[in-house]
Image (tube, rainbow, N blue to C red):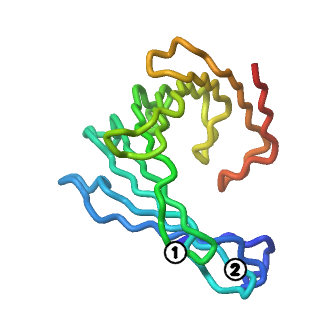
Amino acid sequence: EVVRDNSLTESVDAQIDKTVTTTSRFDTRGNAIDQETKTYVLNSAKEEKLATVRETHNVDINNRGDASSQEIKTYQTDDNGENLEIVSYQVFTNRRYDSDHNVLNQMVFTYDNDSTTKLLLDVQEIRSIGYHSSGVALKQIIATYSDAAKSEIVDVKVIVNDDISSSGNVGVSVVTKY
């Protein structure tokens, strides 16, 4: 459970959100196969309401604990924290990791849902160059395409992160879009 506050003082008034991750299935080496992450926010009456649910399925986990691919379904609720509706389905192909288990080369297919009639929204090729000790990428190059063949480029972004704290908070992030 992780609770984020907008103040150094923990209180209901300072709470931004709460995230709870539950792992329901492990492989024989103890690596997580299936996880569910629920995020709660406070409504105007300061009551916690479910906002999003993310289901992650890790596939082909190697002996180092790195998954070759991941499938992530994201659901959102209505303003009352009810009626979950799928808003995206992503398939990640993790092509290369460094010795610290950071992904260096990744492809992401994003769809509107996980049905047989799903609509491809975009494809991203992500290259990460260098990592801070907290696990935050120092630089990323992200090419976004509109089709699975990657023949129609939408844009390219270069993200440079700086002033990174030991907990992974990024003080300065410069995004250059081409």
Question: Which residue corresponds to the image point at 47% horizontal and 28% vertical from the top-left?
Answer: 107
Q: Is residue 154 above or below residue 46?
A: above
Task: Judge left or right: residue 144 versus residue 73.
Answer: right
Pick whichever, 90 or 24, lies toward us: 90
Q: How many marks?
A: 2
Occupied quadrant, residue 142? top right
Where does residue 154 sit, x and y in percent of width and height?
Answer: 64, 21
Query: What is the secondary structure assignment of the residue under circle 2?
Result: loop
Q: Say the numbered circle drawn on residue 82.
A: 1
Where does residue 99 sit, x and y in percent of width and height?
Answer: 44, 33
- What residue type is disc 2 on? Asn
Pick whichever, 66 or 6, lies toward us: 6
Q: Residue furthest front?
A: 117
Packing grade of label 1 (10 A; few <14, some 14-19, many >=20) is few
Task: Judge left or right: residue 51 versus residue 91.
Answer: right
* N-term mark: 2 or 1: 2
- What residue type is disc 1 on? Glu
Q: Residue furthest top?
A: 151
Pick whichever, 160 or 178, lies toward us: 178
Between the residue at mark 2 and the residue at mark 1, the CA separation in whole angstroms equals: 13 Å
Occupied quadrant, residue 76? bottom right
Where does residue 54 sit, x and y in percent of width and height?
Answer: 46, 58
Question: Which residue corresponds to the image point at 50% horizontal and 16% vertical from the top-left?
Answer: 150
Q: Say the numbered circle drawn on residue 43.
A: 2
Q: Is residue 114 above or below residue 127?
A: below
Q: Is residue 166 above or below residue 102?
A: below
Packing grade of label 2 (10 A; few <14, some 14-19, many >=20) is few
Question: Which residue corresponds to the image point at 75% horizontal and 19% vertical from the top-left?
Answer: 178
Question: Which residue corresponds to the image point at 48% horizontal and 25% vertical from the top-left?
Answer: 105
Where does residue 135 sit, x and y in percent of width and height?
Answer: 58, 44
